[in-house]
Image: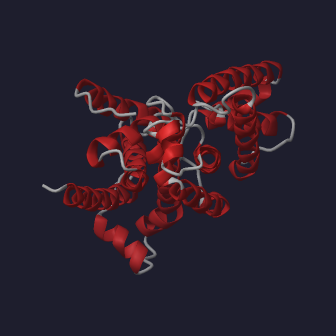
Amino acid sequence: MRVSVRRAVAMTAAVVALLLAVLFSLAVGARAIAPSAVFDALLHGGHSDAAEVVREMRVPRTVIGLMVGAALAVAGTALQGITRNPIADPGILGISQGASVGVVLAIAYAGVHTLTGYVWFAFAGAGVASVAVYAIASSGRGGATPVKLALGGAAINALLVSVTTAILTTKASALDEFRFWQVGSLSGRDAEIASQVWPFLIAGLLLVLAVARGLDALALGEDVAKGLGQKVAVVRIVGGLGATVLTAVGVAAAGPIAFIGLAVPHIARAIVGSDHRWVLPLAALLGPIMLLVSDTIGRIIFPPSEVPAGVMTALIGVPFLVTLVRRKAVAA
């Protein structure tokens, strides 16, 4: 099968799988709802109890899952391309931990106790962390090389973990509230959060897609990229800014959900190759699939309790990545 045909088939299959994941998320939970009742609630405005559950609880949760899954998967893909590091994810530059510090400060010192209030503090923390990492990496000879970005990210991440721990140690009252957010979950998220972050999601996606060709050139090495006419610094800054915004969207809306930004890019590359013009859109489809399926399984695996989506993504995602590694299909 020709590469272009195989890629088109893969994208079509991913779209179908995403639609099924959305239906799965809307229909399955502590109370199972027939697909016909789901469609009735969405298309005909039904007023039954099932319709109310779908519209008021599951639709906002599913929309947040779509947004967060796409944001984290595309951010991870961009960061792996920028740093040329196959194990990069939104945590490598300290972005996720920066958002966590923002939320801790909001709870402990700003008196913010709502998910919609956390969003802006998480955005601010993620932005400050990414700027700090890039400033460290770009100083000295050679500018912001992949190794310096990774080392700077590790240093800032360690610092922010210490700050978070120090605040929670001295402000024990904030611990329980922060722990609920830190585990990563779609539970309790409402339409207001989606309305707050969707403009940033669009902006981040556009920034990353704008440097798709540049990410392909970077994969060949910095000198080759420059020889092909790419402005390496611009690609890194624009792509890094897009990845930062997307990570902030995901972490602010649902907490630091792990593994999607690491595993999904590799799965996408294994399916469509290394061309970022295909990898990025496929990652944007696969990320929500993984998150919605993980969240839905977490609702029903130990009823009536829920396993948070952040826990389930790791449990489901690890076997995928291990399989790819064993097949030597993981590419930088």
Vertical placement of residue 310 versus 175, above or below: below
Q: Residue at x 34, y 55 (%)?
A: 21
Give the x, y percent position of residue 189.
59, 52
Give the x, y percent position of residue 34.
30, 63
Give the x, y percent position of residue 37.
34, 69
Q: Quadrant of residue 195?
A: bottom right
In the foreground, 108 or 76: 76
- State whether residue 225 appears in this view: yes
Residue furthest to the bottom: 44
Q: Residue at x 43, y 38 (%)?
A: 220
User: Is residue 39 rendered to the left or right of residue 304?
Assistant: left
Vertical placement of residue 19 versus 126, above or below: below
- Image quadrant where one finds the C terminus: top left
In the foreground, 249 or 308: 249
- Image quadrant where one finds the N terminus: bottom left
Indicate how the structure is coloured in the image.
secondary structure
Q: Residue at x 50, y 50 (%)?
A: 214
Vertical placement of residue 190 versus 172, above or below: below
User: Is residue 116 rendered to the left or right of residue 47?
Assistant: right
Q: Residue at x 37, y 50 (%)?
A: 275
